[in-house]
Amino acid sequence: MLTLLWELVRKDLRIFVADRKSVVISFVTPVVLACFMGYLYQSTGKPDQPKKVGIYLVDKDKTELTADLVQRMTASGALDVTVTGEAKASAKVSRGDTALAIVIPKGFSAQAGQALLQHTEAPTFQFLEDPSKAIEVAMAKGAIIRVTMQALTKQVYGPSAPSDESQMPFKIAEKAQAAPNTGNTSLCAHAFAGMGMQGLLFWAIESAMTLLREKKQGLWRRLRSSPVSPTMFLLAKGISSAIRAFVILGVVFGVGFLVFRFQIIPTFGNYLGFGLLALFAALMSATFGLFVAALGRTEEQSRGLSILAVLGMCMLGGAWFPLSFLPQFMQNLSKVVPITWAVNGFDGMIWRQQTLADALTSCAVLLGFSLVFAFVALKRIRWEPDAA
């Protein structure tokens, strides 16, 4: 009995070791993921390398105090300040390019000084916030309040300024840069977009495994003797896969709309943009499945490589957490990942107040990925079950 058990175990181990690429992939996948997360947590947790929060500042007052304030914000080590106009600052926050924009109103310096000395009506900072980046906003807000108090007390009291900052001579008006009634559900909508895309790509992997099993069983070889061409075969597979992916994505978002009460911004352009994004995201996932099937030799190799690719795209594409959590070079790298464009596009149609033109840009990029995947699949498809 023990001998038989050992032979069965040895047989499985020999099959596993015989496929060297599969063995390598089995070890590389968890190692790469662990290194990625370890680097991420290490880089964000170093006390000597604090991550700066990028903010845009609109200075309508243009006084010596506000110039000093900008200088102090920049020197604080916590903020990366860009001075610009109000329209550009608002657009940057709406598009998710930055977490926060600050508008300093005209007359702020004089009113704040009087409020500090005479307890008169305090002027108001306007904070334009990205609701999906609450952690960054909170970090920036603390630094802004601190340096503003330092600049004000120096102006009013001089070098001997008191250290008591309990009474702020200014107020803060916070405004989420999101569609009405969506500020509290923006992160939820983002999560559904990210997990929906991740689900589509994992479903595409299973679809590819089905194709590889058909190839192994000789179905592809039998099709070779029929009038079905490789192009027609891939086209049919792609269309059927895209239809199923579109339905899956519709069900995912349907649950979100019904249970979590987020909704598409109620304009014709946003409804149309959302539908087009869902269509092109489904097409991209379908062609990704064909791409995996055409390149794969065995199910084991293909599954391991494609899972690694999908997990990498999800991490870099903001499907698991906001892109702002990543180092800057990874945020730049995320632009070559299809999930980034899909997730950002859905965010734009649901709560970021973007337009149909923004959705069309994302659709064009997703279409480009689809064409690349389909082209490679068409060039690499082999009819024989044992072909390279």
Image (spheres, rainbow, N blue to C red):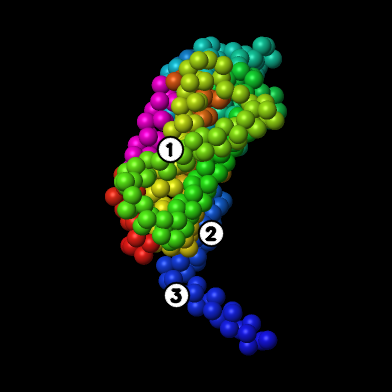
The relative height of residue 372 versus residue 269 in the rendered view (above or below) is below
Q: Amino acid at mark 3?
A: Ala
User: Secondary structure beneath disc 2?
Assistant: helix
Q: Which is more toward the observer, 243 or 218?
A: 218
Q: In terms of image quadrants, where is residue 139?
A: top right
Instruction: Please identify the quadrant where the N terminus is shown.
Output: bottom right
Q: Which is more toward the observer, 162 or 93?
A: 93
Q: Amino acid at mark 1?
A: Ile
Q: On residue 137, which mark appears?
A: none
- Residue 17: x and y, percent? 47, 75
Please report whichever mark, 3 or 2, sits nearer to the chain's N-terminal start. Answer: 3
What residue is at 61 percent from the left and 14 percent from the top? 123
User: Secondary structure beneath disc 1?
Assistant: helix
State which region is magenta.
357-372
Disc number lying in front (1 or 2): 1
Residue at the disc numbered 1: 239
